[in-house]
Image (cartoon, helix red, strand yellow):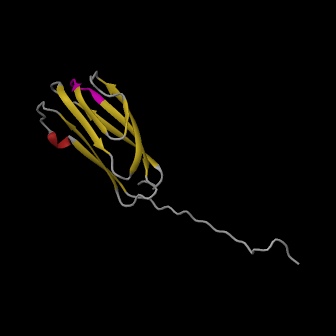
Amino acid sequence: SYTPGGSTTYLIVATNNGPSTATSVAITDTLPPEITSATWSTSITGSPTGVDASGTGNINDTGITMPPGSTITYTVTANISPSATGNLVNVATITSPTPDPDPDNDSDTDSDTPSASADLQITKDDSATSYT
């Protein structure tokens, strides 16, 4: 779940399960409109090349080469609009012209529902400055 006006952190992990090196890899994540701002950074294992180290907003990382067994992890910290309603749906995708024996796992969706929140307030005033 998410809280309108709060923040959320997405972890997006792209992996090349092999057996060949994937070339011209593109990793995208277009953030939902309820996200007002976002920053992201990457960490890698297995020596992929051409990976953007960090950025703001949507992820559109292209021209990557991923050897078998390599991973790229994107950590996205996103601020959510205070007026957000409905489910927060985010889809990340990886593509490459290198043939993929299992293209069904080249996209993944995260969906969060809004959690209840209330901004309660009370005031009291009798408009008098003194009493008898």
What residue is at 41 percent from the left and 38 percent from the top?
A: 39
**Vertical placement of 89 versus 21: above or below?**
below
In the figure, is residue 93 to the left or right of 120? left
For the question of whether residue 63 can be seen, the reply is yes
Q: Is residue 116 magenta?
A: no
In the figure, is residue 2 to the left or right of 129? left
Residue 76: x %, y % from top left: 39, 39
Name the outermost residue toward the bottom: 132
Q: Quadrant of the N terminus?
A: bottom left
What residue is at 45 percent from the left and 47 percent from the top?
A: 7
What residue is at 29 percent from the left and 29 percent from the top?
A: 71
Residue 42: x %, y % from top left: 36, 30
What residue is at 36 percent from the left and 27 percent from the top?
A: 53
**Vertical placement of 4 versus 44: above or below?**
below
Answer with the quarter of the image where residue 122 lies.
bottom right
Answer with the quarter of the image where residue 104 lies.
top left
Q: Is residue 66 magenta?
A: yes
For the question of whether residue 17 can be seen, the reply is no
What's the magenta region? 65-71
**Vertical placement of 12 versus 83: above or below?**
above
In the figure, is residue 37 to the left or right of 119? left
Residue 101: x %, y % from top left: 12, 35
**Vertical placement of 60 versus 108: above or below?**
above
Asked whether 4 or 128 is in front, the reply is 128
In the figure, is residue 118 to the left or right of 37? right
